[in-house]
Image (cartoon, rainbow, N blue to C red):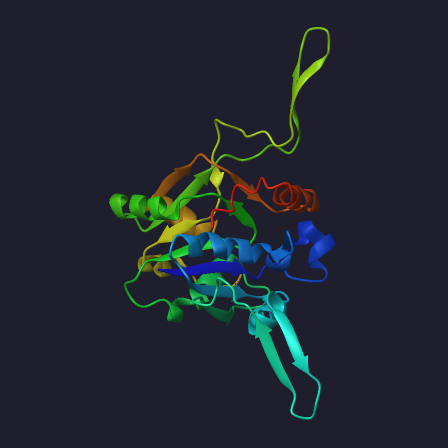
């Protein structure tokens, strides 16, 4: 299946990073978070990507255009017959990446609508955001989608709390501190969606419409929205603190999303 990743937003809540680069290019462990997301899908056999570009999209284009330069050791010959020799390889040599300009200020529904020409008629596709990581079983989400027969299956995730959770005894002593507690009774849209091609019919051409509003509400009203419950790790990257948290998990060898 084609993997469509939304990469065009301005990421205003992460201004410390996004003033200089698009949010999907913010590094986790030295690699853009976008790379981590693509590695998750590639691990499950889906290596044909469509990136919906917008804000500072030229930096994403530059990264992939110079992928060997960015990922390999290099020997340069500085003579008149200049040559470049790349050493070693990388695990992404069988990836296909379509870099699609979808508008500087377009909302998410319009971005997806504009890449319709790259998804063959009648074929389902995978859809996610360029700022969230999970140890999701992509194959199981696809199986669930096929079984339900709906137009769109959203992966339902438990949100993490903004504040640490404390276990306090009657004397006031703290015995447990949970840095990122999950709200077990609630689910939110964590991305990692599976969509039939009919999804495009629910998307207006209006660049001001968000996927998460009118289109998703209409799908639910028509009985065409399904869920795949993911009970494992999920962490969005909306703030600088969450960026630091994901980098900490990576550096400590606790990156649950690293399934490759």
Q: Please provide percent x and percent y for residue 207.
A: 52, 63
Quarter of the figure with residue 36: bottom right
Give 178 or 83, whichever is nearer the viewer.
Answer: 83
The quadrant of the rendering that contains the N terminus is bottom left
Between 88 and 9, the residue placed more toward the observer is: 88
Q: What residue is shown at x 53% (from left), y 29% (from top)?
A: 183
Residue 23 vertical position relative to residue 63 in the rendered view, above or below: above
Near-viewer residue (115 or 35) = 35
As drawn, 199 above or below 97: above
- Residue 222 appears anywhere in the view: no
Residue at image location 59% in from the left, 64% down from the top = 105
Viewed as shown, does residue 10 lie left or right of 230? Answer: right
Q: Position of residue 234 (x, y in %)?
A: 52, 40
Residue with the most extreme bottom position = 80
- Give the answer, above or below, for where 144 lies relative to 9: above
Q: Position of residue 45 (x, y in %)?
A: 37, 56
| Residue drawn at (44%, 60%) of the image | 4
The residue that appears at 49% across and 38% down in the rendered structure is 188
Which residue of the protein is positioned furthest toward the top in this rendering? 170
Q: Is residue 248 visible?
A: yes
Residue 250: quadrant of the picture: top right
Q: Position of residue 182 (x, y in %)?
A: 55, 30
User: Number of labelled discs?
Assistant: 0
Give left or right: position of 164 versus 89: right
């Amino acid at each position: 299946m084609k993997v469509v990743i939304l990469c065009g937003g301005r990421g205003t809540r992460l201004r410390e990073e996004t003033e200089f680069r698009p949010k999907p290019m913010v590094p986790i462990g030295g690699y853009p978070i976008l790379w981590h997301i693509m590695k998750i899908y590639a691990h499950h056999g889906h290596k044909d990507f469509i990136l919906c570009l917008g804000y500072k999209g030229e930096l994403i284009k530059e990264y992939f255009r110079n992928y060997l330069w960015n990922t390999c050791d290099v020997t340069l010959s500085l003579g008149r017959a200049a040559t470049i020799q790349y050493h070693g390889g990388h695990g992404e040599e069988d990836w296909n990446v379509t870099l699609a300009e979808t508008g500087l200020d377009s909302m998410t529904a319009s971005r997806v609508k504009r890449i319709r020409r790259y998804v063959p008629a009648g074929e389902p596709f995978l859809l996610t955001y360029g700022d969230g990581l999970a140890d999701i079983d992509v194959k199981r989400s696809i199986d669930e989608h096929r079984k339900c027969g709906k137009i769109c299956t959203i992966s339902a995730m438990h949100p993490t709390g903004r504040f640490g959770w404390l276990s306090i005894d009657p004397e006031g002593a703290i015995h447990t501190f949970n840095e990122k507690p999950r709200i077990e009774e609630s689910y939110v849209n964590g991305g990692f969606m599976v969509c039939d091609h009919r999804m495009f019919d629910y998307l207006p051409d209006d660049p001001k419409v968000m996927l998460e509003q009118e289109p998703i509400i209409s799908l639910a009203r028509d009985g065409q929205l399904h869920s795949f419950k993911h009970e494992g790790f999920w962490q969005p990257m909306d703030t600088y603190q969450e960026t630091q948290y994901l980098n900490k998990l990576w550096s400590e060898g606790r990156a649950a999303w690293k399934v490759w």
